[in-house]
Amino acid sequence: MIQTKQPRNKEKILEATISVLNGTGYLCLTIEGIAAEAGVGKATIYRWWPTKSHLVLDAFLMVTESAFPFDLNDSIKNNFVEQLKNLADVFSTTLGRSMLAIIVEDKGISDAFYTSYLSLRRNDSAAFLRQAMEREGIEAEVNIDILLDMLFGPIYFRILIYKQTPDERFISELVDHVIAGILPACSGK
Amino acid sequence: MIQTKQPRNKEKILEATISVLNGTGYLCLTIEGIAAEAGVGKATIYRWWPTKSHLVLDAFLMVTESAFPFDLNDSIKNNFVEQLKNLADVFSTTLGRSMLAIIVEDKGISDAFYTSYLSLRRNDSAAFLRQAMEREGIEAEVNIDILLDMLFGPIYFRILIYKQTPDERFISELVDHVIAGILPACSGK
């Protein structure tokens, strides 16, 4: 939520959101419950967040804003294994799964999720990948956007459709396979 | 729905489900509305399908059961471009999007979707890929499961999270990139 003015108790309210959410799940989450947990009035919450889905989005953004940054001193593989493990961990929490369910159902929140989280992470990933490929002398004709989909797509897919959290072994093999695709091929077919 | 006995009007009821769904969307879909459209009693429907989500699942299975089969006389690329186009088309319909929303929310239907649709399609895809790689003399050390995630994951991801239907150009580039990963690499890194 990009605003010049911020609610005075923003962090307390968002921490309360996560705490209550962990107890009730998203369906039974209520603004009343969050207000009680945070020790603020409902009016205070409604002033800044129109619905509980907006609170979940902001709680999600708060939790993920200090996530693992890219490290140009480390390999492409290690960087993306960390990023994907981080992503899998985040989306295996009640907060993360609630966020996914809301995104799938709600176009407005989905747009906000894209603007405030996904597009920023994609830009960081793309910038890192370009710099790392240049540094390692990889001159493959690749579509960075598609490469990122091949890395992130399976994680979202496994969590949303298979209802499984990809483990480190899966993630490591996935990154290996994607990277294999950007190394020059000996024989074209 | 694998049963020895089938409802006499099964196809008519499922066609009615799709027809009403296209008009109302999933939220406002009702068994009453479907019964009226199909010209059957509600009791007939409830006897075979406990909820509207079960009707949507069966309608989805009916629509997708005669989907494009794999063709060993054609290239790996052409086969998967057709499969992914088919998948993207199916999930861009109201029926397909409703199916996705239900899968994300409902563990029971998600399990049924896996058993009746996803696992069968995965098995077909894996069998085709193994045979095709053998025929083309590709001996890459690949994890077929992960390759399939790299192909299908981005399609589900784009539809569910970006709310976009991948077009043929995207699909073609995606398949190219995945296939590039199973060709032998000249220089390892």
Image (spheres, coloured by chain):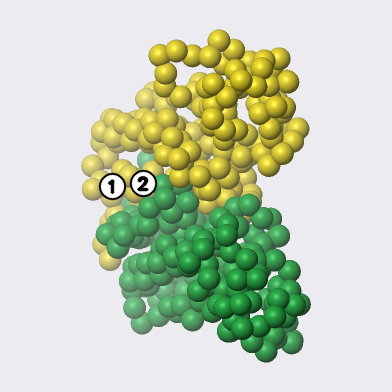
Chain colours: A yellow, B green
What's the mark number on residue A92? Answer: none
Q: Residue at x 74, y 36 (%)?
A: A24
Give the secondary structure at mark 2.
helix
Q: Nearer the viewer, residue A167 or B134?
A: A167
Q: Which residue is mark 2?
A: A147
Considering depth in this image, is B173 or A182 the residue closer to the camera?
B173
Q: The disc numbered 1 marks a residue on which chain?
A: A
Question: In the rendered structure, are the residues bearing label 1 and label 2 in contact, judged by CB atoms less than 8 Å apart?
Answer: yes
- Which residue is drawn at the image coordinates 27% and 59% (left, top)? B169
Give the crowd class for mark 2: few <14, some 14-19, many >=20 residues within 10 Å.
many
Which is more toward the observer, B78 or B65? B65
* A181 relative to B42 in the view: left or right: left
Residue A28 is drawn in which quadrant? top right
Residue topped by disc 1: A143
Picture coordinates of residue B32, whole percent (x, y):
65, 71
The reply to whether residue A187 is visible in this rendering is no
